[in-house]
Image (spheres, rainbow, N blue to C red):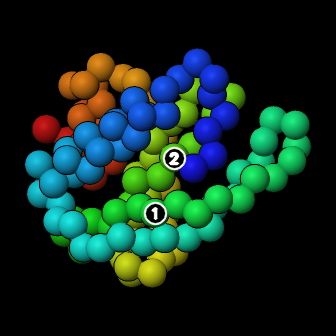
Amino acid sequence: MYWPYLDIDIFEFENRIHIAENFLMKNGATYVNDHTELKHCILQDGSCYTYEDTQKVFKYMDEFIRIDKVFFPNIPWIVLEFSKDIDGPYEDEDPFPYNLEIKEFENEIRYSMGIMD
């Protein structure tokens, strides 16, 4: 995976992806399968980087969910993507920083899922 951050541990970020997956399941989503696709990033210098990314696909109520990465300049963010069809198209919810306190992190997952309590 492409990693543009010298001062952020990629394993810490990947661990947060796993925590997000666990929060999805804790809040009622079920794992469906893995989905692999080519991702394209535009770097700060204007060049493009392409890499292969595998995401877990979950189902919650009548929607499929994937967790995606957003490489903002200072830190990476996480965004949940939703679709009525497993093959997409997927629509992004609001992204959030990967390094939120754990309770706030779970609240962002729940909010994206439409759980408001």
Residue type highlighted by circle 2: Lys
Up-down relation of residue 17 to residue 6 (above or below): below
Seen at 21% across and 66% down, the residue is: 31
Q: Nearer the viewer, mark 1 or mark 2?
A: 1
Q: Residues within 10 Å of mark 2 (few under 14, many from 20)?
A: some
List x then y, in percent, for residue 57.
33, 67
Residue 69, label in figure: 2
**Alpha carbon separation for disc pair 1 and 2:** 11 Å
* Quarter holding residue 18: top left
Residue positioned most to the right: 46
Up-down relation of residue 114 to residue 39 (above or below): above
Of the image marks 1 and 2, the number of the one nearer the N terminus: 1
Residue 42, label in figure: none
Residue wearing tag 1: 54
Seen at 58% across and 63% down, the residue is: 52
Up-down relation of residue 48 to residue 45 (above or below): below
Residue type highlighted by circle 1: Thr
Seen at 57% across and 43% down, the residue is: 70
- Badge 1 marks a residue whose secondary structure is strand
From this viewpoint, is residue 109 visible? Answer: no
Where, quadrant-wise, is the C terminus in this rendering? top left
